Amino acid sequence: MDRMDYIQAVTRTRVLETRLLSRARLERMVDAKDMEEVFKVLGETEYANVMGGLTRDEEYEKILSSELKRVYKLMYEIARDRVVVDLLALKYDYHNLKVLIKEKLLQRDFEDMYISIGSMDFSKVKMDYLAGNFRDMDPKVREAIEEVEKDLEINEDPQRIDILLDKYYFEHLYKLAESTDIPLFIDYVKDLIDLTNIRTLIRVKKQNKDIKFLEEVVVPHGKIGKDDIVLALNDSTEGIAAKFKSFDVGPDIRKGLEAYQESNRLSEFEKLMDDYLMDINKPSKFVNFGPEPIFSYVLAKETEIKALRIIMVSKLNKLSPEDIRERLRDLYV
């Protein structure tokens, strides 16, 4: 990957960064008295281009999904190497695989659950899968599907579809990051795996599942060893925080576990997780030659859209501005 190939792409991305929503604008939406006022503030931004045809407040998701699709399409056009965007798009491919396999297994129509974003032509993947034609599929996707179908035959447990596909997703994601040789991408994926594994550990403890189950759901390739995560099952939350304090994600694990102890909910841990992953991308703002700004901009838009979703759902449910602020993630700008 030649950094000099990204001079023009970075220049264009810098312009796009100026259009990201500021914290001040988000605060105006948080303090808005209703959804009509939220839409009025949003209409002052580049989201105005995707707001046409909205007839009900509950249709806000059309705005958010249209904007996300627009951003992915644009960034695929800008990036010299598709893998830079694939790293963030891949999660939608594996979400769609879960929907597809469940759709076939349960003989139900889940068309509304598909997400029309991804690193591959999913309409072709779906067509090939339903026709039993695995020959033209990405080998990693083919292997994932075959393993899930084999497991279903043996265990007859649809809940294992998510577990298995999550493992294949992280394996695929790690290989993509490794192929770039870009430190930010590799660190991002390793830290994402660590935080995901710690969240999984807490969930397994909360559900009183055994060590065998934890061994199956924890994924490799993080900076924290898989065995270290598994062996922490019988530790207290304080013990877990102490055990992993020296890792990059250690301080956020500690803060997240403290919040979990107070509320018995993982929502604050997940917020800290998102904020950490955003923070490690902020140095991209000072990179003038290379693919990092493109990756970080897409992540910034995803975080921005997540913030808008939180605000809009909260307004529809009549939550107070204080409650909304507690849920908002840190922004890139």
Image (cartoon, rainbow, N blue to C red):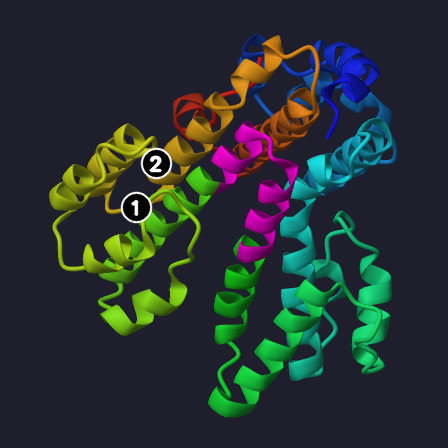
Tag shown at residue 112: none
Front residue of 245 and 74: 245
To which residue does mark 2 refer? 268
Front residue of 316 and 310: 310
Q: Is residue 221 above or below residue 5?
A: below
> Circle 2 sits in a helix, a strand or a loop, which is it?
helix
Q: Quadrant of residue 327?
A: top left
The secondary structure making up most of the magenta span is: helix
> Circle 1 sits in a helix, a strand or a loop, which is it?
loop
Tag shown at residue 265: 1
Seen in the image, is 149 located left or right of residue 115? left
Q: Quadrant of the C terminus?
A: top right
Q: Which residues are magenta?
A: 171-189
- On whether residue 84 falls in the magenta region, the answer is no
Residue in the picture at 84% in, 56% down = 121
| Residue 150 image offset from top left, x and y in percent | 58, 85
